[in-house]
Amino acid sequence: EPEVTQTPSHQVTQMGQEVILRCVPISNHLYFYWYRQILGQKVEFLVSFYNNEISEKSEIFDDQFSVERPDGSNFTLKIRSTKLEDSAMYFCASSSTRNTEAFFGQGTRLTVV
Amino acid sequence: GQQLNQSPQSMFIQEGEDVSMNCTSSSIFNTWLWYKQDPGEGPVLLIALYKAGELTSNGRLTAQFGITRKDSFLNISASIPSDVGIYFCAGQNAGNNRKLIWGLGTSLAVNP
């Protein structure tokens, strides 16, 4: 069964460093998303991406964040200068044009120290 | 912005019991989704609801999209130990952004 895959599963980084979280969405999907979940809290929307551009972003998605689809398969989230409060699980999701439900990857646990 | 209230926050039940949880919103959604999340894993879609009044089943799970489009419930019948996890409702509106608004989750514990 097709699935969304994310790498790495866990990333530890020092405050101020740049991180890139990688995702391979389901192959025939055209809508891509990043969500984050701080430990013990609800899932929060970060950004949606369609037709090679951001279609919506939340207030969390400030200038430190960027997304890219560098080739036909990968979808990346970059945090330019990480802060302690960026520590969270980051989930990538994708959905098709026909159905709107999003399918999620296993997540990347980002720990900023 | 839109808010989702999910209740109960947690449940501790005996194996074999039925479970019910619900979500209410301050405004309408076009789609309601129910996800389950196991510790350290990503959310897994359980049921998607697209029409007001729609009642959909997936095995022992049944979910309904409220007539007002501002609420949804999820029932689990005859619970088993592997039902343990956190259940999230999520609402979605039409449009190209398709972002999901999430409830806070219901943590379910099942005593064998």
Image (tube, coloured by chain):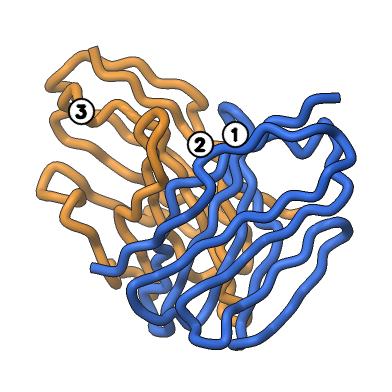
Chain colours: A orange, B blue
Disc 3 crowd rating (10 Å Cα; few below 14, some 14-19, many 20+) is few
Spot occupied by residue A82 in the image (x, y as percentages of width and height): 18, 28
Q: Which residue is mark 2?
A: A107
Residue A99, above or below B101: below
Q: Nearer the viewer, residue A86 or B67?
A: B67
> Which residue is found at the position 64% from the left and 46% from the top?
B36
Residue A40, above or below A91: above
Give the amino acid type for the residue marked by disc 2 in the picture.
Answer: Gly
Image mark 3: chain: A
CA separation, marks 2 and 1?
7 Å
> Which residue is found at the position 34% from the left and 55% from the top?
A45
Residue A84, above or below A53: above
Horizontally, residue A107 falls left or right of residue A98, namely: left
Residue B1, above or below B42: below
Horizontally, residue A32 falls left or right of residue B41, namely: left
Question: Disc 2 vs disc 3: which is toward the camera?
Answer: 3
Image mark 2: chain: A
Disc 2 + disc 3, Cβ < 8 Å: no
Disc 3 + disc 1, Cβ < 8 Å: no
Horizontally, residue A17 falls left or right of residue A53, namely: left
Task: Say if residue A5 shows up in the picture.
Answer: no
Do tags 3 and 1 sit on the same chain? no
Give the amino acid type for the residue marked by disc 1 in the picture.
Answer: Glu
Q: Quadrant of residue A55?
A: bottom left
> Which residue is found at the position 83% from the left and 43% from the top?
B17
Q: Which mark is residue A85?
A: 3
